[in-house]
Image: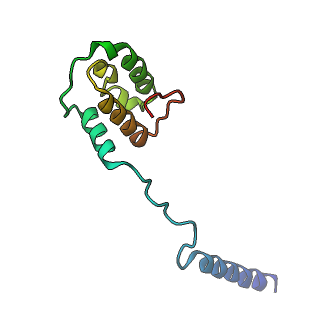
Amino acid sequence: MVRMLLAYGSVFFLSVVDLAASGSYIGGGPRPPRQIKPELYHLGKSVYAGKVATKDLPSLRDEQNQLLLQYQKRLPRTVQSKIDLSSLAGKLDEEQMTALIYFLEIRYKIKIADDKSN
């Protein structure tokens, strides 16, 4: 009798588990895509990839170098070995620098608290 109850109990339990696992998922669902500024993002991506002509702006070199080093340290390690952001210091105008920072913040989810570009 005990065996019979255990057998029926296990069959009943398994059928309930199967019912709970079947059907559509009613969770929160996918999050809507983050609203980005496409022109700024793509300019930043082009600067990051080295596809934008740069200028020599020595007056901005020190300020840009400090900021770019902060972002360099926060990049994933695999990316840090592939790109040297400080090499761009003193070569980007204000628009390019803002776009690069925007791209890094979106792409690598990096945020510097005292960021002066935004």
Can you say whether 59 is above or below 75 in the image? above
Rendered location of residue 36, percent (x, y): 39, 50
Work out whether residue 101 or residue 10 is closer to the camera in this orientation and state it.
101
Q: Residue at x 24, y 37 (%)?
A: 46
Q: In the picture, which quadrant includes the C terminus? A: top left
Rendered location of residue 30, percent (x, y): 49, 63
Q: How is the image coloured?
A: rainbow
Q: How many marks?
A: 0
Q: Residue at x 46, y 27 (%)?
A: 116
Rendered location of residue 111, percent (x, y): 49, 34
Rendered location of residue 61, percent (x, y): 33, 15
* Left or right: 20 as drawn, with respect to 31: right
Can you say whether 34 is above or below 43 in the image? below
Work out whether residue 1 or residue 84 is closer to the camera in this orientation and state it.
84
Work out whether residue 109 or residue 97 is closer to the camera in this orientation and state it.
97
* Left or right: 43 as drawn, with respect to 110: left
Q: Quadrant of residue 71?
A: top left
Q: Residue at x 33, y 25 (%)?
A: 81
